[in-house]
Each structure stands twice: as structure tokens, then as C-alpha cells.
Amino acid sequence: MFHQTALKSVTLVILLLGLGAYVQTGGYYGRELVIEACILAMLALSVDVVAGYGGMISMCHGALLGAAAYAFAAMTALLGWPPSLSFVIAIVASTLLATAIGAVSSRTQGIFFIMATLAFGQMVYVMIFDAPMLGGDDGMAGVKRLNLDLVGINFKKSAPFAFACIALLALSYGLAALMLRSGFGRTLSGVKANEDRLRALGVRVWWVKARAFGFSGLLAGIAGVMAAQHTQFVSPELLLWTLSGEALVVVILGGLGTLVGPLVGAIALVFVKHEISSVTHYWHLFIGIALILTVLAGGRGLYGQFEYVVTRARRRRAKDHA
Amino acid sequence: MLDVRHLNKRFGSLAVTQDVNLSVARGERRLILGPNGAGKTTLFNLLVGELASDSGEIHLDGERVDRLGVDARARLGLARSYQKNNLFDALSVAENLALAVTAARGLSSNPWRDTHRDASVQEDVERVAAQVGLEARLHHTVSDTAYGERRQLEVGMALASGPKLLMMDEPTSGVGPAMIDGFRQLLQSLPTDLTILIVEHDMDFALDLADRITVLNYGEVVFEGTPSEARESALVREIYLGADDA
Ligand SMILES: Nc1ncnc2c1ncn2[C@@H]1O[C@H](COP(=O)(O)OP(=O)(O)OP(=O)(O)O)[C@@H](O)[C@H]1O
Ligand SMILES: [Mg+2]
């Protein structure tokens, strides 16, 4: 079950402050990296909620992100709707879409669940790709950013936008933590541990899964809307299943079922990718090796391993005192 | 309150439940006896819906339930404990019981509040823990507890869901005499309007507590009667004692 431990809180605060400091000191390129890391972290966080706490490995979260990005793009660029309204509608849409996907996929188990989510993700891809007014292969330009002139923030500049991404990442984490420690979140952990037993206790397991999926779609939707605003351009690449795969890799690298891990993984991936890709084109190889090492080392991930070591040391010290 | 009519179940060519009829009154304590492999656990699985029957009907309080899912039947008041421990091993005893209590009270889907900490939930958790003798183990992780304690929790989980019909599958299998005594006291302390189906191998223990007894053999009901009738019955003695290797 989820507990917002002191270790989690401290790590979270350090990460967010670190990102904030980098926005101030890292220059334009640094801000771009921070934005990229925050968006990937939000997506990974949403994947961890279902995979790490609900035992549902999803291969459609890229498509959920992409769907929200496209919805936001279509409303602001094609329909000329205000970005704030479009923001809300886009994340409501991704929430509902995710709930529906979760409701159907939850009728399956294990590998079939993964395949079902993959199939739904591909359906979303095809539907958006084939819709003529959404630009097909070319994508869609002219996406608007939120207009915060009223409160004196120029969102077109990269620093305020980067700070907004950090704030939304913090908000997403807070929402996820709140949900996971609620009665519903506890039930979700129970579903992961032993869903048959919960069913025998009277829990509608499929509906728990569907709602958890929907909540996770909300977080992926926030990431999607920020992604669309970031480049002010959307393309079918946002919907590719490989993005879902990348999110899973990030979660595993950082620590599945730790909630802080996905942030660690996303930040590490974005910055390491940046460093290595300036030296060699084979950065995928390094990520691959890191992933294999993580799995061989017990699969706890960067943050997961850290948490494990700290908790063990603390327990040992308590034992010595006793 | 429970009415089973012409229930059948086969696994391939093996008939594990054959034309079983069973009528249990409210508040009755019904003992199910039978040798290993007689189909006792299968009958429980059919009643709660973990297995689908091939034919026949199950009625609970006049409502037909055999086409309902496991969770829907549980919400109607059917709860069971398992012959093989079926718990949340990574969670504490208290967390296990709280999952059962919140599910039974419709508090398991609240996304805002930690309903496990509700005073009323905690109260129920502690009450059930005391009933099954686990009050001192509440905060131990299940995987760190002894086998016997897990058997107690297994019964606690079923109790915590506040059932109308409590079904226990060999609750005392593999535990020592002290625990069997505790269990006897627990059964006597349960409300008299709670209907109980219990599968038990320990014949003396079970005969004491039962109002009526049903004996299964090769999936068939071969005897039904009171404990004293069962003691008198040559058939029961032959089947049960003859095949009893427990
Ligand atoms: N899922 C299954 N598939 C095939 N055969 C099964 C299955 N479950 C049970 N059986 C068989 O059905 C018969 C009845 O099994 P069941 O577990 O109901 O017996 P039981 O009366 O509970 O026995 P015990 O006293 O050993 O617990 C056995 O022969 C068993 O091997
Ligand atoms: Mg059995």
C-alpha cells in the first residue's frame, strides 16, 4: 500500500527544486530539457499509478497523451476556442477515453491485458491519423498556449512555461498520492495483490480498474496538453506505441510502484539522453544496458533501490538499538 | 435462506457435484462432511460463484443467484473462508481486515478519504481481530505470522465482511488443539441468526456444533440428518471413517 513517507517527500522536494534551479541557470536549452522531463515524468507517473499500484501494464498511455494533445490542438488551432476551456475539455476527454479502455481491458488478464491496451492505443492512432482535418502525417501547427497575461505571466516565454510544467508535475504527484492513500487507492493495491480475494469480498474489480485507468488518463491528459503547448505543434508521433513503451521503461528505471521513481527515471532519461546523444547516436544502447542492469539488480529501479537501502539500514539500526 | 436444487458440476468425465440438493434455514449451523475429494470445496466454489455449475439452481433468500458473479453474490451476503489460505500476504493483519470491512460497507471506492482510518472501520477491524484471537497481531505483516494465525485471519476475513451466510472450508485444518478450542468458542459466540456452512474433518468437534449434517461422497449427498442420526448411521460411519485419513 502507498505511504507518503518522509523519504518520498524529501526526494520529491529536492527533484522539484533542482528542476526549478535548472530553469534559472540552464539557459534556453536547459529549460527545454526541464519541460521535456516534466512532461515525460507526468506520463510516467500516470503509468505508475496503474502499473505499479494496480498491476495493470498499459501500452496505450502514449495514445492517451496524444489524444489529449490532439484534442487541445484541434480546439485551439482549428476551432479557435480559448486554451483554458480547451485544456479542461481535453483532459476530461482523455479521462473518459481511459476509463472506457480500462473498463473493456479489465475483462482480460496478464499478457492479454497488455495486448488489449496496445490495440486500443493503435485504434486511437489510426483514427486520428486518418482524420483529414487533423493533418494526417503532417500533424497540426498553430496550437495556442494558455494566455496568462491577466495575471502578468507571459506564457510564450520558456521560463514561465517551464515553471508551469514543474507546478503541474507537483500537482499530478499530489493528486496521485491523494488517490493512492484513499479508500479507493487501498482497494486498488488489493486488486494488484489478490484480485480474486477482493472479488470474493464483494468488490467490483473491473470498475476499480476502470476508474484507476481513468484517473491515470487524467494525468496523461495533462501531460498531453502541455506537450501540445510546448512545441505548439502536434504530430502522429505523439500517439505511437513506442511512447507508451518509453514511459514504461522510465517507470522501471526509476522504480515501479514508488511514485517518486517515475520522476527520477524521467529526469535521468531526458538528461542522460541529451548528454550521450551529443557524443553518439547510439544512446538507445545505453538506456537498454541501464534497463538490463536495473532488472538484474532486483528490478527496484534507481529510486526503488535507494528506498530499499535506506529502509533496510533504518530497520537494522532500530534492531541494534532494541 | 439457502436453497440448492439439482446442482451438477463435472470436470471432464469426473462428476464432482451430482444432483446436490441442499436447504439451509436461517441461523442454522450446517456441517458438510465427506472424505477427501468428495466435492466439498467444489460445492463451496459453486455456491460463491468461483466455479460455474453445469446445471441446477442456487437461491439465496428467495433470490436466484447462480447466474450472478462472485462479487455480486458477496454483496448479497455470501462470504467464505478458504481451505488454502487466500490472503493479502504483503499487508498487515489490520490492512487485510480493513479491506474486507470497507468492501462490505461500500467504503472501498471513496477516492478522497482514507476510509481505512475511519473510526467505525477501525472498530470493526479490532472487533473481528479480537473474535479470531488476533488482537495482538494487528500490525504484523501476514507473511510474518504463523500458519495458525493465518488460518484465524482466513476466518476473520469472512467474518469482517458481515455476511448473512458464512461458509468456512476446514477452518481448523493444520492447527493445534488450543486453537481448535478457541475456534469452538468463536462459533458459539457468533450471532444466532447467522447461517453457517462448515466443512470440517474433525468429526467430534464438528458434531458438537452442528444443527444438521450433510455427507457428500463422490459428489453426491448420501446422508442428511441431525448429529445423533449421523452417529447412528452405519453408512456415515463406513464412508466417513472408512475413508478418513486426516
Ligand atoms: N479445477 C479442477 N479441475 C479438475 N478437477 C478438479 C478441480 N477442482 C477439484 N477437482 C477434483 O474434484 C474432486 C473434488 O475436489 P474437492 O476439492 O471439491 O474435494 P474436497 O471434498 O474439498 O476434498 P478435501 O477434503 O481434500 O478438501 C477431486 O477429485 C478433485 O481432484
Ligand atoms: Mg476441500
Image (cartoon, coloured by chain):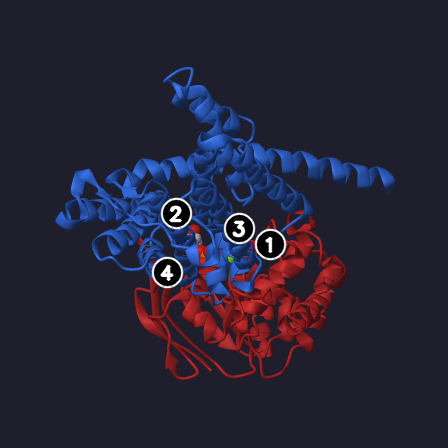
Q: Secondary structure at mark 1?
A: loop
* Viewer-closest of B235 and A118: A118
Labels 1 and 2 share a subunit: no
**Mark number for residue A102?**
none
Q: How far apart are labels 4 and 1 at the CA level?
A: 64 Å
- Kind of residue indicated by mark 4: Val
- Kind of residue indicated by mark 1: Ala
Residue A188 placement (x, y as % from top left): 50, 57
Q: How far apart are labels 4 and 2 at the CA level?
A: 12 Å
Q: What chain is tagged by disc 1?
A: B
Chain A image colour: blue
- In the rendered view, tell whether residue A287 sits above or below residue A312: above
**Mark number for residue A173?**
3
Residue A243 placement (x, y as % from top left): 34, 38
- Kind of residue indicated by mark 2: Met
* Viewer-closest of A285 and B229: A285
The chain painted red is B
Which image quadrant for residue B233?
Answer: bottom right
Which residue is label 1 attached to? Answer: B246
* Viewer-closest of B131 and A155: A155
Which residue is label 2 attached to? Answer: A226
Q: How far apart are labels 3 and 4 at the CA level?
A: 18 Å
Q: How far apart are labels 3 and 1 at the CA level?
A: 54 Å
